[in-house]
Amino acid sequence: MKRCWTLVLALFLVATLCACEEIVEEETLLGFKMVVLTGAIVDDEAAYLFAEKAVKIYGSDTLIHKSTPANFREKLWFDAFLADLLEDPSVKVLIINPAIEHFDGIFEKIRKTLPDMLIVIIRPWASDKISEIADIVLDVNELALGRIIPEQAKKSGAKTLVHYFVPRHMGYPLPLKIQNTMKEVCREINLEFVVAEAPDPLDDSSVPGAYQFAIDDIPLKVKEYGKDICFYTTAWIMREPLISATVEEGAIFAQPFFFGELDFYRNVLDIGWNDKSIGDVKLMNQKTAAKIEDLGMSGRFSIWPIPAAMLMGTAAVEYSLAYCQGDADREADKDLLLKCLQKAMTDYGYGNHNVHVNLAEGTDNFFLITEDYITY
């Protein structure tokens, strides 16, 4: 009889544990979900790697990473993505990094079907009215580059700053403002400012012509002004050959790209990586610094320590967790966001560096960021 009761009790305990496991599993499945949409890794490495790291931290049940197909421009994919999103009421957050033009009209559908969803937009391609559509918008403070790049160039020993511009770009307000600000700041800090026209990658010479121009013109500028010269360009496609020629000539480069992507240095310096190390920002910076030291050029190259897509994406997830857990509402909270950004800096190993946050003019939810530089 004792054996029988022991067996019954054991079966009861097993049944109870199984029931508890089912409850826990059900609670997990019924809890909130966050969807992060990024480009493919070949199109947007930093954003993709941030999202994959976040999935490892928070689990694939809580954080769902969707990436667009490589090099695609297919609106049907977005329609399918939206249909899946709207059919799952447990999704409480949508983070888009970056938000490209195919999202026109989609946010209105989300608001109608899931009115309580927190929408965070990172690096919007079109900023018109984006702050009226999303709850929080994050982007790089590009206008601030007009001040911080000359100041960083000066700290790195530059006596001259060359601003390569594509005439087509100067027809837009922001590049023109950046150039004018650079000119004023250079005057303030006694840094010679040189404006130089560069070929348009969209013209007949195309991308190879822009590449070759950078390779050919940098040595001429160094010969004319000396090696204590720093370069900046409005043409994204020119940055890699610009860095390559700068390294070759022993000149100075303050910031490869306004998002701070590390792959510019990685590609130029031919630094080897594997799948595990490529997302390790601290290790990437250490390898880059070591390579520059081997070249005898320490102190002449700098960058933001964390690619902006990673920093803003990580902070957006932290902020969204607070929202899902009832510690924040949909009204943008600048103080909370700054804490999340600074925590992201710490998580990546740069807690002693600051993030600077400003509001875009005329908004209360469009935040513009810059980071303190590191010097290689």
Image: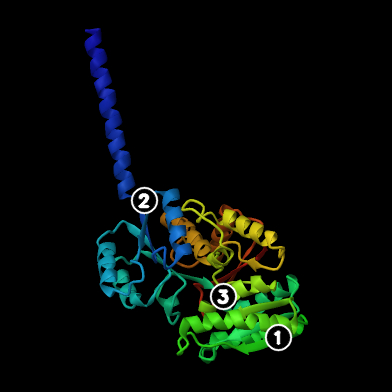
Specify the amino acid type for callout 2.
Ser
Q: Position of residue 284 (x, y in %)?
A: 57, 57
Circle 1 or circle 2, nearest the eye: 1
Q: Position of residue 2 (x, y in %)?
A: 25, 8
Residue 10 is left or right of residue 358, and the answer is: left
**Residue located beneath label 1 in the image:** 193
Residue 132 sits in quarter: bottom left
Residue 90 is left or right of residue 258, and the answer is: left
Which comes before the other along the chain, label 3 or label 1? 1
Q: Pointer 3: residues within 10 angstroms few (<14), some, or many (20+)?
A: many
Specify the amino acid type for callout 3.
Pro
Q: Position of residue 370 (x, y in %)?
A: 60, 69
> Residues at badges 3 and 2 in contact (C-beta under 8 Å)?
no
Which comes before the other along the chain, label 3 or label 2? 2
Q: Residue at x 51, y 90 (%)?
A: 168
**Residue located beneath label 3 in the image:** 241
**Label at residue 60:** 2
Q: What SS does tag 1 mark?
A: strand
Question: In which quadrant will I find the N terminus?
Answer: top left
Q: What SS does tag 2 mark?
A: loop
Relative depth, front residue between 153 and 138: 153
Residue 241 in view here: yes
Q: What SS does tag 3 mark?
A: helix
Specify the amino acid type for callout 1.
Phe
Relative depth, front residue between 18 and 160: 160
Circle 3 or circle 2, nearest the eye: 3
Residue 320 in view here: no
Which comes before the other along the chain, label 1 or label 2? 2
Q: Distance from label 3 to label 1 (Cα)?
A: 21 Å
Q: Distance from label 3 to label 2 (Cα)?
A: 39 Å
